[in-house]
Image (cartoon, rainbow, N blue to C red):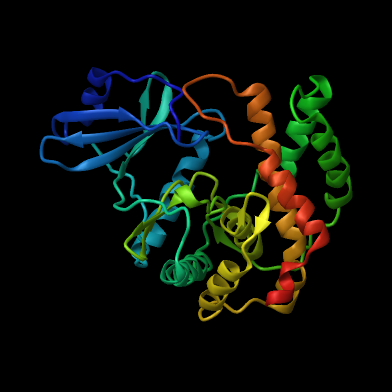
Amino acid sequence: MAVYTEVSLSEAQELFQPLGKIIEFEGIKEGVENTNYLVKLSDNKKFILTLFEKRTEEQDLPYFNNLMKLFYDNGISCPLSLTLNNKNLFKIKGKPCCIYSFIEGRPVVKPNLEQLKSLGNSIAQLHQFGDHSELFRENMMLLPTWKFITSQFSKNETKLNSSEYKYILNNIHTLSDSFPQNLRKINIHADLFKDNIFFVGNQVSGFIDFFFSCTDTIIYDLATFVNAWFFSKNKFIEENYVSFLRSYKEIIELTTEEKSNFNFYLKVSAIRFFLTRIYDLNFNLEGDVKHKNPLEFFEIFKFHEKNNLQDFF
């Protein structure tokens, strides 16, 4: 989430007119992808107004909205797109936008044991129901995006972290032809970072930001989650990983092939976020956005070169 496109109160009120009068309207600066505003109405109901920016294709919005409804209908708390006048996709300043229901709770930075247990169960349920749908969207953030970003840097040399980029580039050449073809694919979140999972007390209260969701392997989603949650200042937090995994495995049983490819996807996920972060630092300079450090995922990639977390399964 972020603010790239400035929207006035009057512009927002015109869209929200069927719902009521806006009394609070504030841009959300967290995140780096789309423009988001917190909207509060006179009846105290809250919503999120999301304007979709460059990385989110308008044609993908029905998939995202239908997937969130699938999860919601199966008891997983996540935003729902609101329908006004028989449509749930609108335009503001020429950009597609949606109104989403508000999810109560806040992210946690340092989860305790009860929160890790809740995480394990909640993400397992997400994967369980993601496997119960014929919805489909290709994962565009791996090979297609790798190709796009590396081609951009071949034309415009990176001004930041160039040695790390060259190291990752060499590994991209090695890994690109090694993606396994025999693993089950389900509908996944694909961006399970701490700021996209909310808690009330010790329990997961909801998931947000489904705009990288796609159809891909369960272990790619799991790898992204592990990289995002169990590293701090370049150190792996083993006890938290083990606690989460114990809870997750109560519901989801991974196949032998999935387990044996987990280290591969841990590295793949680290590359995905290193590349998009270094690209944003060099090219994505518009709007009121706080960019994230790509070196975090460079160090995580290096960790996975030396260690194999699939040994814990």
Q: How many marks?
A: 0
When the figure is inspected, residue 305 is found, relative to residue 75, above or below; the finding is above
At x 32%, y 38%, the residue is 48
Q: Is residue 109 left or right of residue 97?
A: right
When the figure is inspected, residue 214 is found, relative to residue 308, above or below; the finding is above
Which is nearer the eye, 309 or 34?
Answer: 309
Instruction: Report which quarter residue 152 is drawn in.
Output: top right
Residue 270 x %, y %: 70, 49
At x 11%, y 35%, the residue is 42
Residue 44 x %, y %: 14, 41
| Quadrant where the image shows the N terminus | top left
Instruction: Report which quarter residue 140 is drawn in.
Output: top right
Which is nearer the eye, 257 or 69?
Answer: 257
Instruction: Report which quarter residue 172 is drawn in.
Output: top right
At x 16%, y 33%, the residue is 18
Residue 142 visible, this orientation: no
When the figure is inspected, residue 228 is found, relative to residue 249, above or below; the finding is above
| Quadrant where the image shows the C terminus | bottom right
When the figure is inspected, residue 83 is found, relative to residue 53, above or below; the finding is below
Residue 195 x %, y %: 46, 47
Q: Is residue 108 left or right of residue 309?
A: left
Residue 303 visible, this orientation: yes
